[in-house]
């Protein structure tokens, strides 16, 4: 496999301003650290899984990469160019190469447009001079690719089931032949039997088109199935990054361990006899994150140093990094 | 005697486009002190089965058949009687706790109201009981937190409050409709553990409605697999996981990626869930089934014994062919 | 490889077995609207009234400004509705033919209503959609402007305008049009804020669709439902406003007339046994307003079935 990364993210930081009620217009807004110091790289044909609980910043990370939310600091290097430094119009050509699919399959399709129009929109946006016949041909081509009959082109989103809507979303993402698709919880809203269809479809397409994927989900089993490497996020911080098998077999961060132990295994013999590592307490507020290690307030291993010093995100084995003072 | 006994339950909805039958010929019974999981995908009728049983259907829905609770018929009782049963004997919790919590009223008031109203307990006693119930669902600092408003709790804590509220009257049966679907896995694990502990402490029965086969495996004694409004398979959880005898159950089991296993490719069930507006004749799963024979498209299979221990399946194709 | 199994795809498409073009949301809405009897009947009546106001003049014997000297001053005795005299609806106090005048009033009132609403809808939709979509400071400023304009008493300004610049239909039209887009823009802005966070808008932005195209292709079409509903409710509002102004005697200039002016005249002479002078314009006025409200209601139910 070509090891030259197509996407490199370096020390990406995203802050949100939060104003509380009763603030005067001139009051300085509080900063919410949504994404803090995230770095990774991704090569063609690879899949990076991003897991974490709600509020961990995984969706924000995705949106920061495609510049839907402004980044505070850091670099997003796409094929050698730092996207964050580019202006709105300079970014446009790169938008062809990075596409996104979304969580709610129906909500991601304009209800007033028919399927053909929806799928063709990216093509019409970037190549407005394409003759109509070619557009149609391309639409039919991608529809077949994702397993939709092309005679459904004139139908409207509300006439489709969730799984089919997600296929339409994937077809729209594919029509420009992108190099990277960011999947933001693409299967969370789907039924189990449909989930598998969509996961298989994504994996097939990836192989066929040498796509790189960023696969964001909260379901660790699905992520592990599809990903080459997995990043675990907690409160906007990377806590662990490793090959997907390693994450499962030798999780090193206490949070990753708890996360893995919490995933239910569909086998009564395993599930009823396993030792559950429960994390106590609630997620701390991202406006006022704990000092030092962000996980220390709920960590069983936490000691004094964890409150004082933020653990460095460092490699502990090949392709395996973790941010913990007392990792296993 | 079984705690609840459902016979030929049918739930239908009258809509602008005609009558939709959401639940068809559902038969099952459950014993006291058990956890029964009803598993199915969206549109399988799993929630409507329970709503039909407890008289919580939308106004355009109707249920027929028979539902015996502690030996007494409760299907289509008057609202007043059903309310009393629901308050005292059958409690329910839902996926989104905010649907049953009033955002403008303190938790303390919402909890004590139930006791004062239904059991005539004095206000101070009711408060004491409420606090101890919050303790029981492991909400730290319960005596102070009880004065908070629902939105001040996190998602997981809110679900705990909901559970505490539903347990105040010490119900015989707790119906949990996707109680952890909206929660993160780590919180889900906490809540499922809590439910299992409470079930033992209070000696109640639980009907757990879910689509998550992992949750079912971890927490239920018996399970019931539904598809297209009909029961496909019913039996002891261990038995069904060990040897699913229905093509749908089999497909479902192999479609879920497992964390402790690295399969190259997921097995999928082709096609889409049935459109209940025009449910197919015969077996609802037939159009997506790899084993289907001609009979499947014309005749609806009935539940027959699959093995010795209360394991039933609804399939025309013989068990040996599928296993 | 993926399309290896055509048969499998066929099964997937099974739920959508009917062929032909899909049912768009508009088609669905039309069907629901037609099923709503009150709305369909209202639409029919309203169209008849509009048609009448165009065809009616061909059957008129008298023009709307022509004075029947016979009836002048003795409307109660001579000017009653009759086929023979050609005054189908009778005459007013000056002996002018009420039939022609009601037709004229209908034309003017409906025109003011429809044109006023159109202006309000166009301005309000664009303003609201832009404000909502851009968000941030721009949104703040744009909405504060609306707030300020809203806090000015509407009728007072309108009356002042008419007094200062003279009574004319043009002035009336500008006055009403200028002020009635405010509500529209607020409603549209709220809806836009809602839509903006929908994933399909995000999808378009990720793809690189320009802001202008997002507003015109993705936001506005999804707003049309609520805009259509609001517009049908706005028309009677504007007709009412115009009538009120005319009733005060500040509206349409004589010899032109409108429903409000006719009702005012009719109400003024009711004690002289000329009740038809009030009843004919009033009937048209009331029936039309009811029709608009029923249609608006029907549209709302048709376009937004979940609201019910």
Image (cartoon, rainbow, N blue to C red):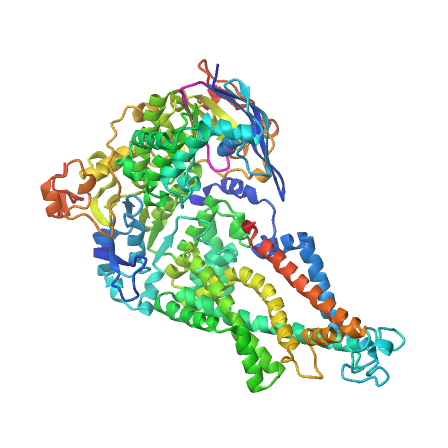
Over which residues does the magenta segment extend? B31-45
* Residue C67, percent from left and from top: 80, 85
* Residue A119, percent from left and from top: 46, 56
| Position above or below: A201 against C280 | above
Q: Residue at x 40, y 54 (%)?
A: A173
Snapshot quadrant of residue A69: bottom left
Total residue callouts? 0
Q: Is residue A150 visible?
A: yes
Seen in the image, is A132 located left or right of residue A227? right
Snapshot quadrant of residue B294: top right
Seen in the image, is B95 located left or right of residue A284? right
| Position above or below: C111 against B156 | below
* B75 or A225: nearer the viewer: B75
* Residue C87, percent from left and from top: 84, 76
* C246 or C193: nearer the viewer: C246
- Please say whether residue B32 is one of the residues in the magenta stretch: yes
Q: Is residue A129 visible?
A: no
Q: Residue at x 40, y 70 (%)?
A: C144
* B110 or A83: nearer the viewer: B110
Looking at the image, the residue that sits furthest to the right is: C84
Picture quarter with the N terminus of chain C: top left
Seen in the image, is B9 located left or right of residue A272? right
* A293 or A135: nearer the viewer: A293
| Position above or below: B105 against B53 | below
- Please say whether residue C36 is one of the residues in the magenta stretch: no
Q: Residue at x 45, y 61 (%)?
A: C190
Seen in the image, is C233 located left or right of residue C203? right
Q: Main secondary structure of the magenta part?
A: loop
* Residue B39, percent from left and from top: 44, 30
């Amino acid at each position: 496999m070509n090891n030259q990364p197509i996407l490199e993210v370096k020390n990406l930081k995203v802050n949100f301003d939060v104003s509380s009620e009763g603030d005067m217009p001139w009051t300085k807004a509080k900063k919410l650290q949504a994404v803090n110091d995230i770095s990774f790289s991704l090569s063609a044909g690879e899949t990076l899984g991003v897991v974490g609980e709600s509020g961990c910043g995984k969706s924000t990370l995705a949106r920061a990469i495609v510049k839907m939310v402004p980044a505070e600091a850091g670099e997003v290097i796409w094929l050698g160019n730092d996207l964050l430094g580019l202006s709105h119009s300079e970014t446009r050509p790169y938008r062809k190469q990075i596409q996104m699919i979304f969580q709610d399959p129906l909500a991601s399709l304009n209800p007033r447009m028919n399927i053909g129009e929806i799928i063709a929109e990216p093509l019409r946006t970037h190549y407005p001079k394409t003759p109509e016949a070619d557009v149609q041909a391309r639409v039919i081509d991608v529809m077949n690719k994702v397993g939709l009959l092309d005679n459904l082109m004139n139908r409207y989103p509300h006439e489709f089931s969730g799984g089919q809507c997600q296929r339409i979303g994937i077809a729209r993402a594919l029509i420009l032949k992108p190099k990277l698709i960011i999947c933001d919880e693409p299967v969370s809203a789907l039924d189990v039997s449909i989930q598998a269809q969509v996961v298989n479809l994504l994996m097939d397409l990836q192989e066929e088109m040498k796509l790189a994927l960023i696969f964001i989900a909260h379901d660790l089993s699905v992520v592990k199935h599809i990903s080459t490497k997995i990043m675990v996020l907690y409160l906007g911080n990377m806590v662990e990054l490793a090959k997907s098998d390693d994450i499962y077999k030798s999780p090193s961060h206490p949070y990753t361990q708890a996360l893995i132990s919490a995933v239910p295994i569909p086998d009564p013999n395993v599930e009823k006899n396993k030792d559950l590592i429960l994390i106590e307490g609630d997620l701390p507020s991202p406006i006022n994150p704990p000092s030092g290690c962000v996980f220390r307030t709920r960590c069983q291993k936490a000691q004094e140093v964890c409150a004082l010093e933020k653990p460095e995100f460092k490699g502990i084995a090949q392709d395996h990094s973790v941010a913990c003072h007392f990792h296993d | 005697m079984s705690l609840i006994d459902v016979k030929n339950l049918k739930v239908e909805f009258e809509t602008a486009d005609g009558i939709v039958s959401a639940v068809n010929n559902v038969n099952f019974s459950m014993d006291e002190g058990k956890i029964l999981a009803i598993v199915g995908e969206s549109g399988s009728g799993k929630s409507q089965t329970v709503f039909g049983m407890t008289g919580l259907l939308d106004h355009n829905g109707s249920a027929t058949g028979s539902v015996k609770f502690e030996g007494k018929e409760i299907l289509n009782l008057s609202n007043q009687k059903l309310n009393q049963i629901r308050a005292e004997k059958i409690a329910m919790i839902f996926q989104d706790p905010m649907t049953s919590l009033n955002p403008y009223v303190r938790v303390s008031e919402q909890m004590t109201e139930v006791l004062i109203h239904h059991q005539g307990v004095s206000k101070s006693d009711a408060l004491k009981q409420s606090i101890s119930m919050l303790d029981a669902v492991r909400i730290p600092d319960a005596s102070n937190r009880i004065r908070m408003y629902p939105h001040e709790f996190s998602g997981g804590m809110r679900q705990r409050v909901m559970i505490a509220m539903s347990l105040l009257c010490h119900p015989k049966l707790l119906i949990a409709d996707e109680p952890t679907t909206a929660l993160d896995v780590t919180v889900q694990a906490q809540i499922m553990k809590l439910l299992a502990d409470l079930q033992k402490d209070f000696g109640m029965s639980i009907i757990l409605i879910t689509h998550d086969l992992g949750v079912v495996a971890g927490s239920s004694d018996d399970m019931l697999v539904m598809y297209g409004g009909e029961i496909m398979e019913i039996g002891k959880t261990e038995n069904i996981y060990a040897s699913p005898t229905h093509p749908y159950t089999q497909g479902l089991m192999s479609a879920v990626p497992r964390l402790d296993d690295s399969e190259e490719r997921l097995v999928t069930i082709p096609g889409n869930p049935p459109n209940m507006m025009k449910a197919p004749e015969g077996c609802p799963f037939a159009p997506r089934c790899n084993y289907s024979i001609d009979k499947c498209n014309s005749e609806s299979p009935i539940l027959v014994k699959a093995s010795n221990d209360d394991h039933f399946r609804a399939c025309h194709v013989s068990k040996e062919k599928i296993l | 490889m993926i399309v290896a199994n055509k048969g499998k795809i066929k099964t997937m498409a099974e739920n959508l077995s009917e062929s032909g073009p899909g049912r768009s949301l508009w088609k669905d809405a039309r069907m629901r609207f037609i099923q709503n009897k009150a709305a369909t009947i209202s639409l029919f009546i309203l169209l008849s009234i509009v048609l009448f106001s165009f065809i009616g003049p061909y059957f008129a014997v008298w023009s709307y400004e022509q004075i029947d000297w016979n009836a002048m001053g003795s409307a109660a005795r001579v000017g009653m509705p009759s086929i023979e005299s050609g005054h189908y609806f009778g005459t007013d106090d000056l002996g002018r033919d009420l039939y022609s005048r009601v037709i004229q009033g209908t034309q003017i009132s409906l025109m003011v209503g429809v044109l006023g609403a159109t202006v309000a809808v166009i301005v309000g939709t664009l303003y609201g959609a832009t404000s909502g979509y851009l968000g941030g400071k721009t949104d703040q400023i744009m909405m504060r402007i609306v707030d300020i304009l809203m806090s000015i008493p509407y009728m007072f300004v309108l009356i002042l305008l008419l007094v200062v610049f003279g009574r004319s239909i043009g002035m009336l039209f500008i006055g009403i049009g200028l002020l009635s887009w405010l509500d529209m823009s607020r409603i549209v802005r709220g809806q836009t804020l809602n839509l903006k966070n929908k994933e399909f808008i995000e999808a378009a932005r990720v793809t690189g669709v320009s802001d202008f195209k997002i507003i015109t292709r993705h936001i506005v079409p999804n707003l049309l439902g609520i805009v259509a509903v609001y517009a049908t409710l706005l028309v009677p509002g504007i007709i009412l406003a115009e009538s009120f102004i005319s009733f005060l005697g500040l509206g349409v200039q004589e010899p032109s007339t409108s429903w409000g002016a006719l009702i005012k005249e009719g109400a003024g002479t009711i004690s002289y046994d000329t009740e038809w002078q009030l009843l004919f314009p009033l009937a048209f006025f009331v029936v039309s307003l009811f029709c608009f409200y029923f249609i608006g209601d029907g549209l709302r139910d048709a376009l937004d079935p979940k609201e019910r």
